[in-house]
Image: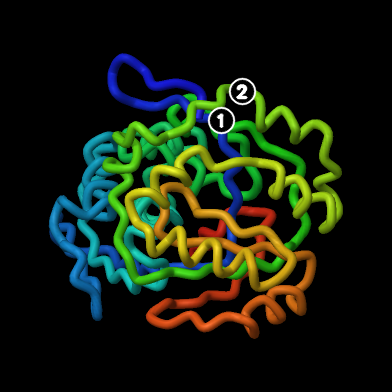
């Protein structure tokens, strides 16, 4: 975290990385102009409180598209987990409807639209390994990190991002920590894990103070064995990195994760959004 701006936003310098944990959206062109969203097995809103609906409406408004869409969203990314699930769904909606409606926007134009929906939506359109600056919308590609395994532990808690950013416990560390990227060998597994271990999440103290269970879980995982454990974004999800799947299995085998959801994933060198015909 670099500084708190006068308008209330925070400027950041953050390493953002795509991983292979995915929601699924099915987009069907509708004969009328209505945008209908279904989220089976979820209590998410299906009106304009949902970023998917807002993304579709924004794209249509800016391009003059006359079609509607029927959208089915199957959630797998935990809600309120700090993994960018809602933003990635908005990004996928923009990319998919741009093709379905044949609106012809280029990736940069889609990213600019995405920034109006949320600061991290442009990242989910681009994907891969990115340095995010500004409020998260300014992206610089980083050397592709190796395909590391990652363990995601969700303690079934919803964390409000806004409440964490409003906390006085946020640490403003300026530009220092991410300058260490220049001195890391990100091309190797050991180098990438070592580099992430040296970086800090300035939101983590505020999240752990507001949600002691997350702090206890973080400490428990840290004692279970070698590896790196960090809060993802503002939480509530924790991610655990090791150089090999065996290392993560050893850590997992020493844990009793009651009332938690555990996901296995891998780093991805490109964005996770794929569009079928």
Within-10-Å neighbours for mark 1: few <14, some 14–19, many 20+: many
User: Looking at the picture, how far across and down is residue 161, in whole percent?
Assistant: 32, 46
Residue at (35%, 71%) from the top-left corner? 156
Query: Would you name the residue on which mark 1 appears?
Result: 13
Residue 139 x/y as whole percent: 57, 32
Q: Is residue 24 left or right of residue 243?
A: left
Q: Could you tell whether 272 is left or right of 163 in the image? A: right
Q: Do the residues labelled 2 and 1 touch (CB within 8 Å)?
A: yes
Image position of 178 with respect to 194: above or below: above
- Secondary structure under tag 2 reads loop
Given residues 27 and 86, the one toward you in this image is 86
For this rendering, which residue is in front, 186 or 118?
186
- Asked which secondary structure carries label 1, the reply is loop
Residue 132 occupies quadrant: top right
The answer to whether one can see residue 218 in this image is yes
Q: Name the residue rendered at 38%, 80% in the picture.
A: 259
- Mark 2 neighbour class, 10 Å CA radius: few under 14, some 14 to 19, many 20 or more: some
Between 213 and 136, the residue placed more toward the observer is 213
- Residue at figure coordinates x 58%, y 45% from the top left: 16
User: What residue is shown with label 2?
Assistant: 175
Rendered position, 53 above or below 237: above
- Most extreme residue toward the top, as rendered? 6
Q: Is residue 261 above or below residue 195?
A: below
Residue 46 position within the rendered picture, expressed as x and y whole percent measured from the top left: 16, 62
Earlier sequence position, callout 2 versus callout 1: 1
Which residue occupies the foreground of this view, 225 or 8?
A: 225
Residue 266 higher or lower than 179, as above or below: below
Q: Distance between the residues labelled 2 and 1?
A: 7 Å
Residue 54 position in % (x across, y down) = 23, 47
**Could you tell whether 45 is left or right of 239 in the image?**
left
């Amino acid at each position: 975290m670099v500084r708190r701006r006068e308008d209330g936003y925070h400027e950041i310098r953050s390493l953002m990385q795509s991983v292979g944990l995915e929601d699924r959206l099915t987009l069907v062109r509708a004969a009328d102009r209505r945008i209908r969203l279904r989220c089976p097995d979820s209590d998410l809103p299906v009106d304009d409180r949902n970023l998917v609906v807002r993304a579709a409406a924004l794209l249509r408004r800016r391009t003059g598209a006359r079609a509607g869409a029927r959208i089915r969203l199957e959630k797998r990314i935990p809600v309120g987990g700090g993994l960018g699930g809602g933003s990635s769904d908005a990004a996928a909606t923009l990319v998919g409807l741009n093709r379905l409606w044949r609106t012809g926007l280029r990736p940069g134009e889609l990213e600019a639209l995405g920034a109006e929906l949320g600061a991290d939506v442009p990242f989910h359109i681009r994907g891969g390994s990115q340095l995010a600056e500004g409020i998260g919308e300014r992206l610089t590609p980083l050397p592709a990190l190796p395909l590391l395994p990652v363990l995601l532990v969700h303690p079934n808690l919803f964390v409000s991002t806004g409440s964490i950013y409003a906390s006085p416990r946020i640490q403003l560390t300026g530009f220092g920590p991410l300058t260490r990227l220049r001195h890391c060998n990100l091309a190797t597994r050991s180098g990438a894990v070592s580099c992430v271990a040296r970086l800090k999440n300035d939101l983590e103290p505020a999240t752990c103070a507001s949600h002691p269970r997350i702090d206890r879980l973080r400490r428990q995982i840290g004692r279970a064995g070698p590896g790196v454990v960090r809060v993802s974004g503002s939480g509530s999800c924790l991610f655990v990195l090791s150089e090999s799947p065996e290392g993560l299995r050893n850590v997992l085998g020493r844990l009793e994760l009651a009332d938690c959801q555990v996901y296995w994933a891998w780093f991805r060198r490109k964005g996770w959004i794929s569009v079928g015909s």
